[in-house]
Amino acid sequence: MTQDELKKMVAEAALEYVIPGTIIGIGTGSTANHFIDCLAGIKGRIDGAVASSNASAERLAAHGIRVLDLNSAGELSVYVDGADESNHHLHLIKGGGGALTREKIVAACADKFVCIADSSKLVDVLGAFPLPVEVIPMARSMVARELVKRGGQPVWREGFVTDNGNDILDVHNLDIMEPARLEQDLNNIPGVVTNGLFALRPADVLLLGTEDGVKKIT
Ligand code: 5RP
């Protein structure tokens, strides 16, 4: 199976977590896109969706799925999203698509976070994928120096602007042995909006697409 077929398989499996009559949170990226496409088939069963990016909001709307603003939606029953990496504790690296801040906000409002990914995303130790950090543009160089002090090698994602109007630094070679501690530490650097570690609020369920079918990790 191709990587895309594995992503589609887990997206279909995630439909099981959709609770009828509720509002759900939707992630960003190619796996989340497959989930949106699957959701279109049962759109009459949900009250609507909150998107973690403009791109996902547009895709939902194109399918005729009601898109709500988070402020008017309140609590979400479930948040479904992909990841760039997951360890066995379901701590994640996210933000390859640059939507990490809104993803973290929407995930924080959900009763359950279901992560959907192909099997290449499961790792023993996070960090082979460079950690995305969203920064206020005027603080980019200052934050980059702070990241170097912590052993990372930040690379500015030049030409990319987040939905919030900010910059992204992709940080290579960080030592991520304690993801929750590092998540907190990096978020305390002035100018950092948030970083792509999802460890303080990890996923609750990981649906992993493998050659042998969907593997559920909790
Ligand atoms: C976007 C993300 C995505 O979930 C992550 O990049 C995985 O993407 P894909 O499903 O395309 O592999 O965090 O900001």
Image (spheres, rainbow, N blue to C red):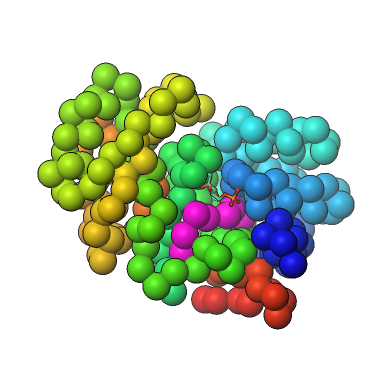
Farthest residue, direction top = 138
- Relative to 44, say whether 212 is above or below: below
In-image side of 48 versus 133 (left or right) = right
Q: Nearer the viewer, residue 212 or 80?
A: 212
- Name the image quarter holding the N terminus: bottom right
Quarter assignment of residue 179: bottom left
What residue is rendered at 62% in x and 39% in y? 51
- Relative to 196, say whether 17 is above or below: below
User: Is residue 137 shown in magenta?
Assistant: no
Residue 201: x %, y % from top left: 40, 59
What residue is rendered at 59% in x and 68% in y? 119
Q: Is residue 109 visible?
A: no
In-image side of 118 versus 165 (left or right) = right
Residue 54: x %, y % from top left: 61, 30
Q: Which residues are magenta?
A: 80-86
Residue 109: x %, y % from top left: 50, 49
Q: How many marks?
A: 0
Q: Nearer the viewer, residue 13 or 6?
A: 6
Farthest residue, direction bottom = 212
Q: Is residue 1 visible?
A: yes
- Relative to 78, say whether 124 is above or below: below
Residue 31: x %, y % from top left: 65, 52
Q: Nearer the viewer, residue 41 or 86?
A: 86
